[in-house]
Image (cartoon, rainbow, N blue to C red):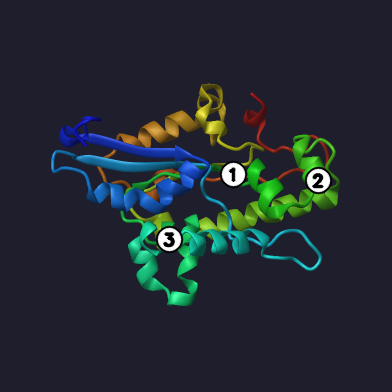
């Protein structure tokens, strides 16, 4: 705490990208609990860490990624390494699910502002595993059927994130776009370039950060894709994704 000045901090923003984004979901409340009384503003902004609890595109579908993460949870004996309220909410046989962002997010009390693509490029190749060739080419070679699949994944992402009261809890927000990227928010060009409803990610995040903890309605700081991929080229429906 002393080595990094946290023992006298007044404002703390916790963040991380990819696995670090997932860690932000899992540990935000724990880190918050360790902060000194001098901290008057603590918030969390996970980047590209909302990995879906989702089957792959096999026929029939297989929960490949969930099975892999269940193994990781049990192999690392992670019961005390994730959100404690999530653990308490589930029977022992299902507590491994708390290693997923959606389960821990549902129990996060700290103000939180996820930044993520609903068609995250890493998830396309490692969770969904379908339509990979067209996705890798930034949708350029996608068929109408593949676009429909990708739109289905995007809808699943929005549904998964929106299923919990955390999503609408005062003090929270989110910026979820449809750009084919992973941790793109960590690039200044993208942070200043991605737009939803005429607002850049940077503007949305700064407006959320500037509010008092737990104050504004979440709807005032929540930005969702607002469109689906087009069946015909150009498939991307958000022009700011290619800035």
Distance from disc 3 to disc 1, alpha carbons, whole Å, reads 33 Å
Task: Name the outermost residue toward the left.
Answer: 37
> Is 170 positioned to the left or the right of 147 in the image?
left
Mark 2 vs 3: CB contact within 8 A: no
- Counting from the top left corner in percent of width and height, residue 102 is at 49, 58
Q: Quadrant of residue 241?
A: top right
Number of callouts: 3
Residue, disc 1: 225
Identify residue for label 2.
231
What secondary structure is found at the residue carrying circle 1?
A: loop
Q: Residues within 10 Å of mark 1 (few under 14, many from 20)?
A: many
Q: Which residue is mark 3?
A: 78
Left or right: residue 171 versus residue 48 is: left
x and y percentages locating residue 106 in the rendered image: 42, 61
Q: How far across and down, in percent of the image, does residue 141 sit?
A: 85, 38
Q: Residue at x 51, y 29 (%)?
A: 186
Residue under the point 83% across and 41% down = 232
Mark 2 secondary-structure assignment: loop
In the rendered image, residue 114, in percent from the top left (x then y), is placed at: 46, 45
Q: Quadrant of the C terminus?
A: top right
Mark found first going from the N terminus, 3 or 1: 3
Give the mark nearer the N terminus: 1 vs 2: 1
Q: Helix, strand, or loop for circle 3?
A: helix
Residue 100 relative to residue 112: left or right: right
Q: Nearer the viewer, mark 3 or mark 1?
A: 3
């Amino acid at each position: 705490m002393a080595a990094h000045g946290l023992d006298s901090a007044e404002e703390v923003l916790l963040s991380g990208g990819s696995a670090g984004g997932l860690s932000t979901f899992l540990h935000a409340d724990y880190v918050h609990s360790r902060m000194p009384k001098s901290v008057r503003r603590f918030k969390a902004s996970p980047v590209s860490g909302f990995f879906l609890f989702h089957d792959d595109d096999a026929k029939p579908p297989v929960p490949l990624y969930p099975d892999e993460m269940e193994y990781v949870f049990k192999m690392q004996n992670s019961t005390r390494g994730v959100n404690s309220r999530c653990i308490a909410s589930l029977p022992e046989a299902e507590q491994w699910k708390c290693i997923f962002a959606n389960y821990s997010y549902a129990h996060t009390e700290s103000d939180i502002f996820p930044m993520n693509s609903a068609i995250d490029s890493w998830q396309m190749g490692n969770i969904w595993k379908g339509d990979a060739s067209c996705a890798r080419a930034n949708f350029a070679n996608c068929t109408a059927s593949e676009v429909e699949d990708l739109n289905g994944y995007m809808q699943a992402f929005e549904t998964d994130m929106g299923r919990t009261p955390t999503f609408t809890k005062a003090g929270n927000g989110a910026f979820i776009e449809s750009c084919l990227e992973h941790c793109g928010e960590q690039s200044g060009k993208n942070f200043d370039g991605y737009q939803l409803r005429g607002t850049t990610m940077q503007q949305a995040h700064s407006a959320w950060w500037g509010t008092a903890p737990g104050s504004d309605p979440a709807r005032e700081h929540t930005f969702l894709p607002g469109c689906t991929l087009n069946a015909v080229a150009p498939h991307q429906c958000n022009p700011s994704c290619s800035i």
